[in-house]
């Protein structure tokens, strides 16, 4: 079988295709074409596209399909002839099944888009919150304006010191720092010449009396003496109470000792009356009385000279630093006393000893050497004074007078109130604050209404403009004083603009 030829050089006719008849298409209506039945022809093995069948040597039997006539039908020819692609691309597109939608990927994309939108909205919300303008209302608070001045100071109390010459011993009766009344016993002073031997002699006599009373009581049936039993029981009970008070460290021990002493004296007086006929006991009582009279010759009781706080601690300045003398000291003298130099007029006598002092309540004075010598305080003005000590004390002080000399400024300040916090302070460092009490509002709460500066106060029945005096103002807040009372106070609400 010969391969087809293209003798006419028809460009649309290629090898492997059958020539189109010239009479095609027919002029008559085309009838349906039914190809004739063809016998089954085994498929010739192909070595390759457009290649001839495999070679068979001479003398070998040819395959059956080579002896069969080559079908002339163009459809059958297509089955045996190698196919080659057309010289141009067909305009007909092959059928493709529709692509199925991937819903998982779609959901993922939608989720990412929604998350991005939420993130953007969150960033916008945070930005708006951070850049949000101040609230439309604000709360009024208390404020303080002023300057601080520091310096060294001496404290002057309204006190009197009591002294005694030739003291050998002091028995304290009043409690340190307690309030005493005029005439109340404070202490007992024993003058020179008195020694502890006198007390030893007195105690020996009292010990002999006690031992001899025990001998007499041993010879007496105490059970029949109800009065003595009661007195003994009272002394033992009071002694037990005193012991418990010492162990617990609670209660007034001085008062308890006084009660115990009274019970012992009452029992001693009863025993003295019970054995009044005993000569030995009477002789011992006489020896005790004589020794007491001897001791009283060296004894001097002290009573409070005035009502106030009693203290047995002195520093030597009480005589010169008091309400009668402090105005006469210059800044230089005050500086010397601050360093601890005692004036000559404050010195005690050779044998003079300070016994106690009485501090009157009501007020005290501070002599302040201000570090800022150029400052001019206002006489009669009130300042806040901080006394720097173990327990910092804040009080209100009033300027009484000032003295400027030798490069230093001495400010005399008066403090009205309890003197107990400064009972043991003589010198310290102080801070003086020039304070002006005001109300504080945000700076943008101030508004101008027809030339008058004020704030708009929020009330339950409406908002009202209140004129104020502006004491101080910065970019954030303003210190104001309302011109009308009882309207604006701490905790009030004002509008901001």
Image (cartoon, rainbow, N blue to C red):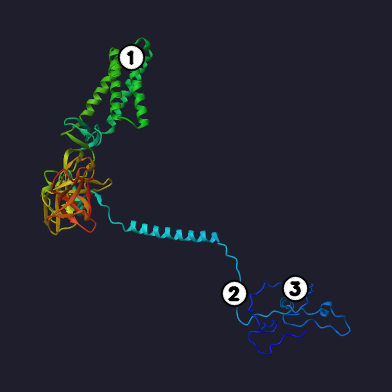
Q: Earlier in the sequence, mark 1 or mark 2?
A: 2
Q: CA distance from mark 1 to mark 2?
A: 146 Å
Q: CA distance from mark 3 to mark 1?
A: 165 Å
Q: Depth check: 376 or 105 in front? A: 105
Image quarter where the N terminus lies is bottom right
Quarter location, residue 149: bottom left
> Badge 1: few (under 14), some or many (20 or more) residues near its Cα, within 10 Å?
some
Residue 268 spot, x, y in % from top left = 29, 19
Circle 3 SS class: loop
Disc number for residue 36: 3
Pointers 1 and 2 in contact (CB under 8 A)? Answer: no
Q: Earlier in the sequence, mark 2 or mark 3?
A: 3
Front disc: 3 or 1: 3
> Badge 3: few (under 14), some or many (20 or more) residues near its Cα, within 10 Å?
few
Farthest-out residue, right: 59
Disc number for residue 349: none
Q: Earlier in the sequence, mark 3 or mark 1?
A: 3
Q: Which residue is mark 1?
A: 228
Front disc: 2 or 3: 3
* Residue beneath the point at 38% across and 14% down: 218
Q: Which residue is mark 2?
A: 92
Circle 2 SS class: loop
Does the image show residue 298?
Answer: no
């Amino acid at each position: 079988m010969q391969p087809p030829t293209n003798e006419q050089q028809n460009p649309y006719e290629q090898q492997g295709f059958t020539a189109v008849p010239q009479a095609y298409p027919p002029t008559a209506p085309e009838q349906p074409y039914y190809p004739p039945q063809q016998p089954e022809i085994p498929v010739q093995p192909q070595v390759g596209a457009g290649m001839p069948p495999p070679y068979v040597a001479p003398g070998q039997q040819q395959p059956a399909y080579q002896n069969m006539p080559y079908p002339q039908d163009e459809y059958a020819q297509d089955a045996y002839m190698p196919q080659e692609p057309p010289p141009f691309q067909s305009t007909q597109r092959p059928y493709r099944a529709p692509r199925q939608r991937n819903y998982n990927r779609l959901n993922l994309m939608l989720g990412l888009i929604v998350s991005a939108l939420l993130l953007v909205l969150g960033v916008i919300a945070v930005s708006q919150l951070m850049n949000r303008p101040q609230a439309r209302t604000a709360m009024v608070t208390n404020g303080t304006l002023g300057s601080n001045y520091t310096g060294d100071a001496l404290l002057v109390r309204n006190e009197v010191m009591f002294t005694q010459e030739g003291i050998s011993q002091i028995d304290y009766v009043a409690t340190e720092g307690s309030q005493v009344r005029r005439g109340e016993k404070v202490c007992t002073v024993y003058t020179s010449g008195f020694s502890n031997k006198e007390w030893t002699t007195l105690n020996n006599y009292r010990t002999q009396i006690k031992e001899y009373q025990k001998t007499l009581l041993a010879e007496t049936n105490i059970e029949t003496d109800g009065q003595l039993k009661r007195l003994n029981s009272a002394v033992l009970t009071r002694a037990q109470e005193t012991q418990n008070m010492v162990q617990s460290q609670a209660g007034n021990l001085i008062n308890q000792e006084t009660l115990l002493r009274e019970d012992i004296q009452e029992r001693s007086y009863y025993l003295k009356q019970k054995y009044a006929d005993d000569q030995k006991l009477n002789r011992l009582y006489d020896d005790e009385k004589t020794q007491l009279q001897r001791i009283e010759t060296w004894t001097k009781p002290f009573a409070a000279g005035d009502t106030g706080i009693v203290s047995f601690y002195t520093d030597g300045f009480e005589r010169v630093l008091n309400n009668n003398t402090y105005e006469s000291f210059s800044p230089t003298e005050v500086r010397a006393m601050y360093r601890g130099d005692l004036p000559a007029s404050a010195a005690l006598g050779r044998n003079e000893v300070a016994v106690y002092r009485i501090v009157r309540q009501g007020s005290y004075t501070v002599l302040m050497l201000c570090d800022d010598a150029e400052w001019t305080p206002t006489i009669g003005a009130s300042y806040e004074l901080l006394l720097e000590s173990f327990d910092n004390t804040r009080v209100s002080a009033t300027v009484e007078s000032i003295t400027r000399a030798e490069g230093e400024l001495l400010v005399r300040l008066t403090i009205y109130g309890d003197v107990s916090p400064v009972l043991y302070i003589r010198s310290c460092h102080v801070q003086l604050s020039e304070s002006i009490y005001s109300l504080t509002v945000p700076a943008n709460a101030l508004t101008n209404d027809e030339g008058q500066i004020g704030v708009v106060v929020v009330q339950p029945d409406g908002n009202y403009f209140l004129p104020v005096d502006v004491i101080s103002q910065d970019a954030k807040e303003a210190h104001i004083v309302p011109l009308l009372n009882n309207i604006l106070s701490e905790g009030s609400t004002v509008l901001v603009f």
